[in-house]
Image (cartoon, grey):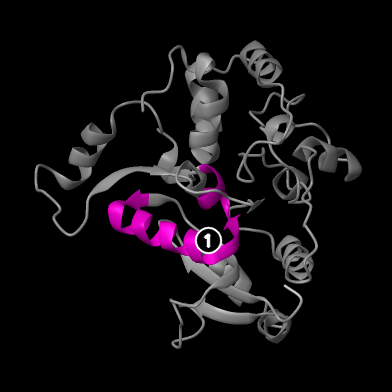
Amino acid sequence: MADKPKAGFYGFTGCAGCLLTILNCEDELLDIFNAADVKSFLMANRANFEDEPLDVAFIEGSITTEEQLEKLKKIREKSKIVVAIGTCSCYGGVQAMYFGDGNFEKRWKQVYGEGKIELTEAFESKPIDEFVKVDFYLPGCPIDKKQFLEFYSQLVRGIPPRLPHYPVCAECKWNENECLLMKGKLCLGPITRGGCNARCPSDNVPCVGCFGPADEVNINSEMKLLLERNYSREEIIRRIRTFAGASFVRQFSKLLGEEAKK
């Protein structure tokens, strides 16, 4: 990556909020495109070169169909570095909150009935690292603008980017916020990756875990604390699953009472 690196931006199943966050970097947008030779960014440019090899590919969204999976594998094959951007790509997102419960077909029929979709075969949404090697993760729902700009500027210079490893709780303390857990609210700050500057708790709103799980979490302690505050086990697990469904199942399937069904 000694010369200007070749980059691509791609979106799969999700709301496209992370790619929109990048496009909304209006004051920095020219710098983003000047720092790399952007070969593909469908939301930003009609001229896309899908067969070009890439130094880095930024991928938003989870994988839900065989067609998406085929495209994902092609992106991985032509890219030196793959970055999962956003919680959907990193952990599965809201659409993967029931990941591994074995009831995908039942939920599918609740939405689409008995009709068969013939354009492409669909399956339960999964994060991209279920299928291909991911080199770096940039979570968030959506990603944070400031964090993306720092991450991107390091990556296009060949510097391995670093993200916060601490939980949201640390940012709450730095902002001198009163602990919402101590006020009896179902807050996921102790087990959620920081980087949002405790945006929700700073407005007296409990953390919902949209940046995904922190690197080192004590899920048992969080469960015990919330159970002591009269939240049901089902309610706690549902809240944790909302954004980190697939990741939560992989790491803590024993808490669900059974191993996740594949």
Against 154, residue 112 (above or below) is above
Question: Could you tell whether 32 is left or right of 14 in the image?
Answer: right
Name which residue lies at 13% across and 55% down.
118
Q: Which residue is mark 1?
A: 59
Q: Which residues are magenta?
A: 64-91
Q: Position of residue 227 (x, y in %)?
A: 61, 13
Report the predominant secondary structure element of the magenta stretch: helix
Quadrant in the picture for the C terminus = top left
Q: Residues within 10 Å of mark 1 (few under 14, many from 20)?
A: many
- What amino acid is found at the position of numbered circle 1 in the picture? Ile
Q: How many marks?
A: 1
Q: Position of residue 110 (x, y in %)?
A: 20, 39
**Secondary structure at numbered mark 1:** strand
Name which residue lies at 63% across and 28% down.
186
Instruction: Write down the quadrant of residue 165 in the picture.
Output: top right
Q: Position of residue 126 (x, y in %)?
A: 43, 43
Q: Is residue 89 magenta?
A: yes
Instruction: Write down the quadrant of residue 25 in the picture.
Output: bottom right
Q: Position of residue 149 (x, y in %)?
A: 74, 68
Against 197, residue 223 (above or below) is above
Quadrant in the picture for the N terminus = bottom right
Question: Could you tell whether 155 is left or right of 85 in the image?
Answer: right
Q: Is residue 18 visible?
A: no
Q: Is residue 197 magenta?
A: no
